[in-house]
Image (tube, rainbow, N blue to C red):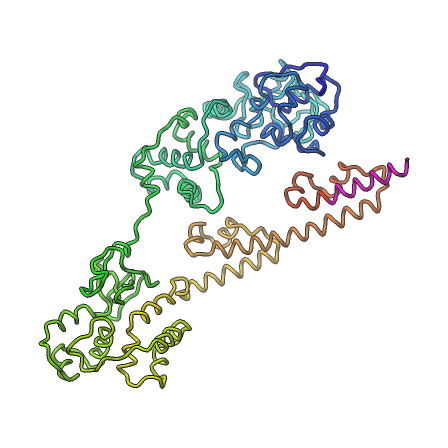
């Protein structure tokens, strides 16, 4: 392995890309060829892809090879934002991390006085929110004076000169500072600490807990109301989801969110790393609020679950107003005995079926035989109500006072009853079936515990959709169909804007999955259209352009796509282009040979 003949030393605050450009210039080599043929991780690196070197160089350069070539023992990763990424990225999965979203500028920023002193590009000039040079107390320029154009970083291959007009950037005008210098200092030192390789790793959950603790005023009891005034609903929801690890796909907290919260509370990054979050606070975030129905217990004295907390099961009805005006909520039933309950306006548990109150009257009735008329008069019940009560107890605790002889429960008949209920059959229709020898036999099956259980199993909450829910769903689907037809971006944010609601409302309505399905559908459609378009453009290009003039660069310019971006969208397309280029190359070589 050869070494570069001329050793070039890096500056302490220089970006790695700037250093590579100086090395290639000093050794009279082409930077792109050098990366592709000697130290590059991947082949066919394009000039427009070089910007990623300053963020995660391990995707582009084999670091150990580079050290040997350049004869440098210093760590080139320190000249990038790599360590800032490592401190917050789980399992070193740096490839698809969105941690740095919106942090870096797409255009070159520079200080003319810094370039006049030493012609190299400083790493922190890449940061979008850093607007000034703290050394010279002037604003960073973001465009060339001579051509009055912003400078796209992807076309910068010569340090200190405008790629558009070749003007000397060190001789540009210097603007006065028009921004908050204290905030600029804070951002500058934030990134100086962030890029320190000695910092420990913080998991996404730790980051979320610390940020929530800060916004909670360092109080050990989580107070959502206080935090709502300090951050948007979406960001708060995201922080809570990350802290609880409740997302199906692992996420990290974006760096910009960390910056915004720490700056607004005047907390340095090093203090954030060293901060300890009390276990009490973490528990208030993690501990789920126990639903009221889980605290309730069956009140039936004969039940196996009598007074056992958590013995009641939700039926799917949340709230209902009775004919007498009373409001009942949290409808539940006991899966052991079949009694039905709800919570009244005083938050007391009440039995809806009234079997318990009647049971208390029945057990004090003298043990002897009664007729229906006698028993109904004694218990002050109508004949119909009495028949239902006796049918209920007949398969649980048979009563001596029951005027009806015991009813044998036939397995096939019970299964038939349950099946009819499961298929949505109405009780009145089942009652009319000719299989019943009497009305009392029908009622015995009707109030059998297995029948009651099955009826509630089929009453799933999601199926209890009211008219308002149906209208919302219909409106959403109509909107998504329209967006799909117009090829408008189907995202949660855009859908919320169109419906004039927030993301949390969409989630509460249970519509996230619907939006997700349409989003996937649109993505597939767009990908197929893109493949069709790219294949057509590539084939036509090879048919119309003379072979010697076809290069990888010219081809990607023709299809108006960056190679890396196209590869991320569909590797099949870049493979096809590489195949066409290789086929042409081999054909030319064969012709000349």
- Residue at image point 77% right, 38% down: 554
Compared to 331, does 211 lie above or below? above
Q: Which stretch did the figure color magenta?
A: 576-593
Q: Nearer the viewer, residue 62 or 86?
A: 62
Q: Nearer the viewer, residue 419 or 467?
A: 419
Compared to 377, does 49 lie above or below? above
Quadrant housing the N terminus:
top right
In this rendering, the count of numbered labels is 0
Asked whether residue 515 is drawn in magenta, I would say: no
- Residue 21 coordinates in the image, percent (x, y): 68, 22
- Residue 237 coordinates in the image, percent (x, y): 41, 44
- Residue at image point 70% right, 33% down: 43
- Residue 448 coordinates in the image, percent (x, y): 29, 73
Left or right position of 132 against 312: right
Left or right position of 337 against 428: left
- Residue at image point 35% right, 63% down: 316
Q: Residue furthest left?
A: 366
Q: Quadrant of residue 217?
A: top left
- Residue at image point 43% right, 29% down: 263
Quadrant housing the C terminus:
top right
Q: Quadrant of residue 74?
A: top right
Q: Main secondary structure of the magenta part?
A: helix
Compared to 122, does 576 lie above or below? below
- Residue 455 coordinates in the image, percent (x, y): 35, 69
Asked whether residue 589 is drawn in magenta, I would say: yes
């Amino acid at each position: 392995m050869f070494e570069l003949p001329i050793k070039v030393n890096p500056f302490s605050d220089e970006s790695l890309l700037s250093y590579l450009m100086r090395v290639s210039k000093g050794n009279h080599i082409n930077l792109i060829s050098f990366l592709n043929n000697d130290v590059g991780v991947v082949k066919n690196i394009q000039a427009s892809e070089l910007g990623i070197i300053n963020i995660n160089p391990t995707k582009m350069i084999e670091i150990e090879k580079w050290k040997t070539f350049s004869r440098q023992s210093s760590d080139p990763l320190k000249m990038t934002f790599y360590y800032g990424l490592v401190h917050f990225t789980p399992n070193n999965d740096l490839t698809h991390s969105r941690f740095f979203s919106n942090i870096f500028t797409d255009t070159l920023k520079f200080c003319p006085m810094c370039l006049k002193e030493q012609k190299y590009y400083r790493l922190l000039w890449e940061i979008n929110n850093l607007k000034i040079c703290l050394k010279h107390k002037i604003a960073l320029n973001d465009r060339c004076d001579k051509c009055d154009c912003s400078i796209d970083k992807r076309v910068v291959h010569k340090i200190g000169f405008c790629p558009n007009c070749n003007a000397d950037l060190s001789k540009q005008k210097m603007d006065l500072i028009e921004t908050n210098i204290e905030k600029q200092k804070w951002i500058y030192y934030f990134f100086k600490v962030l890029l320190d390789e000695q910092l420990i790793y913080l998991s996404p959950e730790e980051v979320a807990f610390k940020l929530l603790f800060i916004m909670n005023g360092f109080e050990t009891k989580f107070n959502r109301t206080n935090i709502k005034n300090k951050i948007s609903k979406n960001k708060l929801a995201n922080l809570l989801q990350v802290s609880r690890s409740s997302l199906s796909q692992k996420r990290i907290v974006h760096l910009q969110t960390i910056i915004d919260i720490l700056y607004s509370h005047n907390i340095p990054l090093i203090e954030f790393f060293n901060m300890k979050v009390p276990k009490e606070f973490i528990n208030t975030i993690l501990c789920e609020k126990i639903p009221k129905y889980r605290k309730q217990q069956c009140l039936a004295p004969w039940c196996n679950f009598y007074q056992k907390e958590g013995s009641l099961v939700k039926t799917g009805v949340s709230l209902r107003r009775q004919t007498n005006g009373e409001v009942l909520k949290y409808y539940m039933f006991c899966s052991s005995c079949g009694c039905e309950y709800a919570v009244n306006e005083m938050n007391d548990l009440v039995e809806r079926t009234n079997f318990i109150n009647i049971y208390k009257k029945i057990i004090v009735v003298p043990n002897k035989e009664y007729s229906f008329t006698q028993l109904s008069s004694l218990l002050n019940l109508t004949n119909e109500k009495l028949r239902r009560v006796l049918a209920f107890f007949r398969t649980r605790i048979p009563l001596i006072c029951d005027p009806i002889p015991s009813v044998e429960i036939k397995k096939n008949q019970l299964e038939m009853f349950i099946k009819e209920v499961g298929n949505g059959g109405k009780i009145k229709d089942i009652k009319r079936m000719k299989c019943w020898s009497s009305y009392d036999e029908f009622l015995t099956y009707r109030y059998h515990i297995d029948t009651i259980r099955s009826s509630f199993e089929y009453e799933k909450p999601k199926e209890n959709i009211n008219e308002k829910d149906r209208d919302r769903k219909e409106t959403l689907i109509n909107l998504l169909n329209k967006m799909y037809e117009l090829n408008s971006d189907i995202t949660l944010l855009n859908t919320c804007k169109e419906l004039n609601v927030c993301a949390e409302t969409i989630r509460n309505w249970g519509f996230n999955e619907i939006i997700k399905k349409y989003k996937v559908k649109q993505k597939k459609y767009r990908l197929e259209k893109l493949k069709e378009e790219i294949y057509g453009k590539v084939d036509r290009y090879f048919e119309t352009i003379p072979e010697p003039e076809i290069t990888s660069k010219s081809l990607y310019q023709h299809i108006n796509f960056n190679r890396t971006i196209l590869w991320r969208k569909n590797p099949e397309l870049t493979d096809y282009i590489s195949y066409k280029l290789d086929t042409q190359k081999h054909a030319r070589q064969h012709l000349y040979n």
